[in-house]
Image: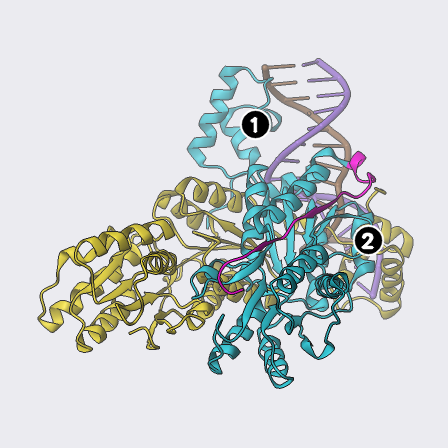
Chain colours: A yellow, B cyan, C purple, D brown
Amino acid sequence: MSKKINIFDIATRAGVSIATVSRVINDSPLVKEETRQKVLFALKETNYTPNAIAKNLRIERSHTIGFISTGILMCFYNLISKGIEDIARSNKYNVFFCNSDDDPVKEKQYLTALSEKRVDGIILSPTGKNVKLIEDILSFGIPICLFDRSIDELHCDRVTVNNRDASCKAVRYMLDKGYRRIGFISGPVSRGTGKERYDGFVQAFRDAGIPMTEELVAYGNFTLESGVKCTEKLLSAGGFDVLYVANERMAVGALQCLSDRDIRIPRDTGFLMWDDPYWTTLLKPKLSAISQPVYTIGTTAADLIFKRILKGDSYIDKDPIRVTLDAKLIIRESL
Amino acid sequence: MSKKINIFDIATRAGVSIATVSRVINDSPLVKEETRQKVLFALKETNYTPNAIAKNLRIERSHTIGFISTGILMCFYNLISKGIEDIARSNKYNVFFCNSDDDPVKEKQYLTALSEKRVDGIILSPTGKNVKLIEDILSFGIPICLFDRSIDELHCDRVTVNNRDASCKAVRYMLDKGYRRIGFISGPVSRGTGKERYDGFVQAFRDAGIPMTEELVAYGNFTLESGVKCTEKLLSAGGFDVLYVANERMAVGALQCLSDRDIRIPRDTGFLMWDDPYWTTLLKPKLSAISQPVYTIGTTAADLIFKRILKGDSYIDKDPIRVTLDAKLIIRESL
DNA sequence: TTGAAAGCGCTAACAG
DNA sequence: CTGTTAGCGCTTTCAA
């Protein structure tokens, strides 16, 4: 590999100073056209590639943001990523995509790496731990925008979905339809989206004045495996006439389980799931689902981050902005 | 935001030189334990965050690689990404995930940005254009590993799948089963995976000594929409007794189209698709598919890149390594 | 309109 | 074992 060309080499070739080369590269207007041409020529001739690392060190800005999701495998994150990527691109930013796998240790490693790399902002779906570290990063001057899940004590931007409300409406819909044995595969209810969706479930029963059967709720952890297990549990607990699942991964597990036992939808049970991956309409019957505005979640989070980044330090202490988006119930054929 | 703490501040606090601080941070063995403790103390006290940008500038290595895929939306890329991320993490690297959308203009922008940011390597699914630029980057000293698609004239590592062979075997299987009107939704055949899968298709007929019907192949461009269109075309061209689709996106389109017209699998037609997203087993019947070792593609590409990165410049000129992985036919119920 | 020079924060000889 | 110092490649006053 040949010695890399730098701004000094260009300056020498063009017979100007490095300051002038820098000006040309950065489209400064205060360069005589003639001089500019000389520099441009030297630039082409050598196909010089500016060193962004040096530049970033100097201007103290990396033109990079970080994105930490809790699981790269979920379709759910694909469109969020795309939203973020699109907004970043339009701002001439690159993004570090990281995946914590919902593991606080990995999350910590990535948060640390990202702040050492001096990203200009971080979009994060938090595991719920590392709160102190996140606060440190914030006070270090790096804006953070939470999405999907949120952490109450954290004083930062966030974009979430009205989980509780959407869940409540969905359950009410089922109740209105006459379903009574609603089997619910819930996420963990200690906090976060799992809790909110659960709360909505409970609320709907309360609103309707119908007693809720505790045996009809099974608590999973949002993984495919737990979807299978919970379905089995509900089945052996007397079954249900509709199955309501709190996220996509568990829904896949549930669907597999039902299929293995030849329990048909909608003949033997209704079905409703959170998240609406593109394959829901490929199944027969087409699956009803609670659809989150995934692409918008991504673009919104990115917009919030760029608002902070572009406004500079003066904006850092501004109050957090909290955006709540609507998830909506899409009725197809499974219910 | 408070003034950032740097290595100099730590040195002052600990009453040592910046060189010593640097040594402690980098776990150099030649520091007296007592001194190390003093520095460590100052480090904790301030929660200092090393500036990786400055470090990278100095050591001329960014501990970052770039990944450019041609479409973030495909399930196909999810596991590839995961493979890359896993390997990168184990090497303490971060990765810029970029998405060209198969657009040469975006690809060019990203390639340029990545080389300016001095990534230590790039994993790329090429659009096929920008060959000159890719060569420049290579000769600039940044290793590149192509995956999925390859470009013959490029002298660099690549990991691909035996598209032609797998396609040929799959078609032979169908022929052996007695299918004769095999409708084929092909990708573009000018080059790349599209061409290879098409070639395999042709070959199988030739091997079997069975004449191939040109009206039974429709040429799409790997998008969902083209999957729909091609299916319609084949249907109006007299139909087929099995439908063979060259990638996932087009398969989704085809499936939607068949479903809309109430053409059932396998009652009315057989079905075989390239790629094996996790939902294939959720459908009834379970879909037969040609499965690519996606996770392995990711880890292999990343391993190749890290081999070059870690061996340093001396390795740069070594001959390209070309890995070909097997895609395998998985027979389920649709065929 | 241009150039000289001072760093950005860090690492790595080199000298002690 | 520790400190001094010279850069890495770039931007940005400040002067000319």
Q: Is residue A210 left or right of residue B81?
A: left
The amino acid beneath tag 1 is: Val
**Taking A277 as reference, is A195 above or below it?**
above
The quarter of the picture where residue B8 lies is top right
Residue toward you, B77 or A66: B77
Tell me the residue at 15%/55% (across/down).
A215
Q: Which residues are magenta?
A: B313-335
User: Is residue A315 in view from this perspective?
Assistant: no
- Identified by mark 2, the residue type is Leu
Q: Secondary structure at mark 2?
A: loop
User: How many residues crowd around disc 1 within 10 Å: few (fewer than 14), some, or many (20 or more)?
Assistant: many
Horizontal and vertical percent for residue A81?
Answer: 51, 61
Against B266, residue A75 (above or below) is: above
Pick the front one: A40 or A101: A101
Q: Earlier in the sequence, mark 1 or mark 2?
A: 1
Residue B131: % across, % down: 81, 60
- Classify mark 2: residues with Cα within 10 Å, few (<14), some (14-19) or many (20+): some
Q: Which mark is residue B258?
A: none
Q: Which residue is mark 1?
A: B21
Judge left or right: residue B22 versus residue B163.
left
Q: Are marks 1 and 2 on the same chain?
A: yes
- Secondary structure beneath dot 1 equals helix
What is the x, y in percent for residue A46? 87, 55
Disc 2 designates what residue? B154
Q: Is residue A225 magenta?
A: no
Find the distance from the CA under tag 1 to the CA under tag 2. 45 Å
